[in-house]
Image (cartoon, coloured by chain):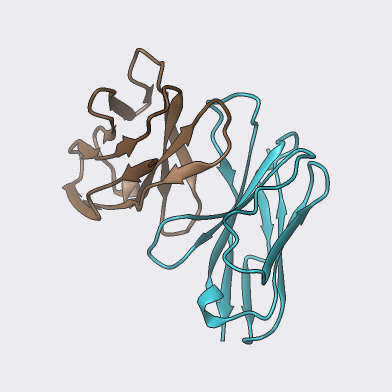
């Protein structure tokens, strides 16, 4: 079965610390992609970062990086030097196959950055 | 630049009434998705349109839900005889399907409240 699991329903992190949000996935397909989205309290879904299953390097976008461990089927999001504006829900999602057809979504992690 | 536009942003209606939600995707995006997000929960896939292909309606929760899209333009999601459990935020997203690493871009959603 294809599934995304985010085991942390909520996290509190001190401002300026790094934070790792966990995401594990389950698929038997060899070709897949992993996406992370941020959803602030205002409700919009903001794309953060993408990792393809054949990408040899871990994806990075500014303060965001993806710790991709293929053998463990994990794709954790790392946010360096957290800021108050990082407080939001974070969703991990998986595309299976070679088309951006459906995304399989995790339940999300609520991240709160403490000043 | 123009993103995904949804209207109305908020809709309050009485149980039993029909509602129509509108989504205007990013120009040139061939794929369009509708999701439902109940309060504090993740995204629930409803329906997917890709160009002129038959839509994937596998996520529609009941026959009260229907959606249309004309070509690669505007889509409408219609809920007939609304029930209180239909209260949620309805999110629309669009993407370029031709490239597998393309993310889905989301609108701000329609917050639907059924009294």
Q: Which quadrant does the C terminus of chain B fall into? A: bottom right
Q: Nearer the viewer, residue B87 or B9?
A: B87
**x 39%, y 40%: residue:** A2
Q: Colour of chain B?
A: cyan
Residue A115, visible in the rendered structure: no
Q: Colour of chain A?
A: brown
Q: What x and y, as percent, mark residue A28?
A: 38, 30
Q: Which quadrant does the N terminus of chain B fall into? A: top right
Image check: B69 left or right of B14?
right
In the image, is residue B84 above or below residue A26? below
Q: What x and y, as percent, mark residue B46?
A: 58, 56
In the image, is residue B7 above or below residue A2? below
Q: What x and y, as percent, mark residue A93?
A: 42, 41
**x 67%, y 57%: residue:** B6
Image check: A95 left or right of B73?
left
In the image, is residue A48 above or below residue A15? above
């Amino acid at each position: 079965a294809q599934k995304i699991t985010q085991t942390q329903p909520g996290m509190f992190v001190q401002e300026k610390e790094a934070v790792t949000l966990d995401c594990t996935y389950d698929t038997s397909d060899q070709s897949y992609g992993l996406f992370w989205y941020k959803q602030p309290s205002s409700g919009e879904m903001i794309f953060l970062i993408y990792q393809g299953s054949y990408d040899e390097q871990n994806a990075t976008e500014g303060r965001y990086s993806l710790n991709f461990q293929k053998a463990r089927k994990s794709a954790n999001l790392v946010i360096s030097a957290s800021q108050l504006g990082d407080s939001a829900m974070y969703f991990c999602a998986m595309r299976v196959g070679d088309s951006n057809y459906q995304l399989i979504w995790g339940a999300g992690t609520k991240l709160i950055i403490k000043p | 630049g123009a993103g995904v536009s949804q209207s109305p942003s908020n809709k309050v209606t009485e149980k039993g009434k029909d509602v129509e939600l509108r989504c205007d995707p990013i120009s040139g995006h061939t794929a369009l998705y509708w999701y439902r997000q109940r309060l504090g929960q993740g995204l629930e896939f409803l329906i997917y349109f890709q160009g002129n292909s038959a839509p994937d309606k596998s996520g529609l929760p009941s026959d009260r839900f229907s959606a249309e899209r004309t070509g690669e333009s505007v889509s409408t999601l219609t809920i007939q005889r609304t029930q209180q459990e239909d209260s949620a935020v309805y999110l629309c997203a669009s993407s370029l399907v031709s490239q597998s690493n393309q993310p889905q871009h989301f609108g701000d959603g329609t917050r639907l409240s059924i009294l």
